[in-house]
Image (cartoon, grey):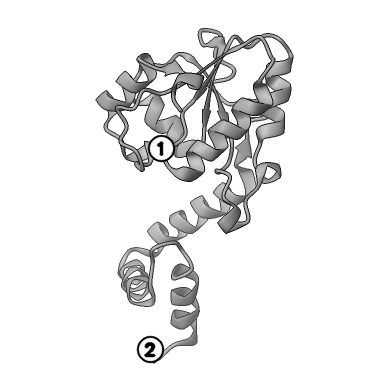
Amino acid sequence: MNFSSKILENAVNEVSQLPGIGKRTALRLVLHLLKQPASQTHQLAAGLVKLVDEIKFCEKCHNISDKDICEICSNPSRNSEIICVVEDVRDVMAIENTSQFRGLYHVLGGKISPIEGIGPHNLTIDSLIEKVKTGTIKEVIFALSSTIEGDTTNFYIFKQLKGLPIKTSTIARGIAVGDELQYADEVTLGRSIVNRIPFDNSF
């Protein structure tokens, strides 16, 4: 791809590093930005800089937050005795959209995947185990996607929690095997949370 401008080429190269964006799509997006008022592009750039510089991860659940403790964890009306374990922030959003869950979350930051070089130490599993060991948690819900990686992660955490006086459950399989949680419709996902089953009955 030949560029008449080095500045344009650099912008296209940067945008094309985003997931799912090739060089042609990046060029189209950059040219679109050039057609917009400069103030709009400056606003976009400022929003991205603020995202990188000021975003925080909740000290309790590792969810993305504007503050040290996220709004969910700091909400006194939430049931702090139930923890829902999810892969990332998109899953928190998906479950929250169902309005069927009033407990708290724990965001792992991924799933165990030896092929991708992701082991238990790359996730926030240790802090989850420590949280449960405090004795204030009565139930842990596994809400990872029904994939090999998701099931492996669920089982690993289940083994780490074995012997602790808590209930472990998993979302009902209204979610098809192999599906990502974030793509499930709200009704199906909501019913899966409400109709969760004991984890040791799920395998």
Which residue position holds label 1?
Answer: 146
Q: How many numbered markers are drawn?
A: 2
Which residue position holds label 2?
Answer: 1
Secondary structure of the residue carrying numbered label 1: loop
Pointer 2 local density, CA inside 10 Å: few below 14, some 14–19, many at least 20 = few
> Whole-percent x and y of residue 48?
51, 53
Tag 1: amino acid = Ser
Q: Earlier in the sequence, mark 1 or mark 2?
A: 2
The residue lying toward the viewer, choosing from 146 and 182, is 146
> Whole-percent x and y of residue 108?
59, 36
Q: Quadrant of residue 121?
A: top right
Residue 55 vertical placement versus 135 (above, below): below
In the picture, the disc for residue 11 is none
In the image, taking residue 143 as reference, residue 187 lies left or right, namely left
> Whole-percent x and y of residue 146?
41, 37
Residue 176 vertical placement versus 174 (above, below): below
> Is residue 65 among what the camera can see?
no
Q: Quadrant of residue 44?
A: bottom left
- Residue at x 34%, y 68% (from the top left corner): 29
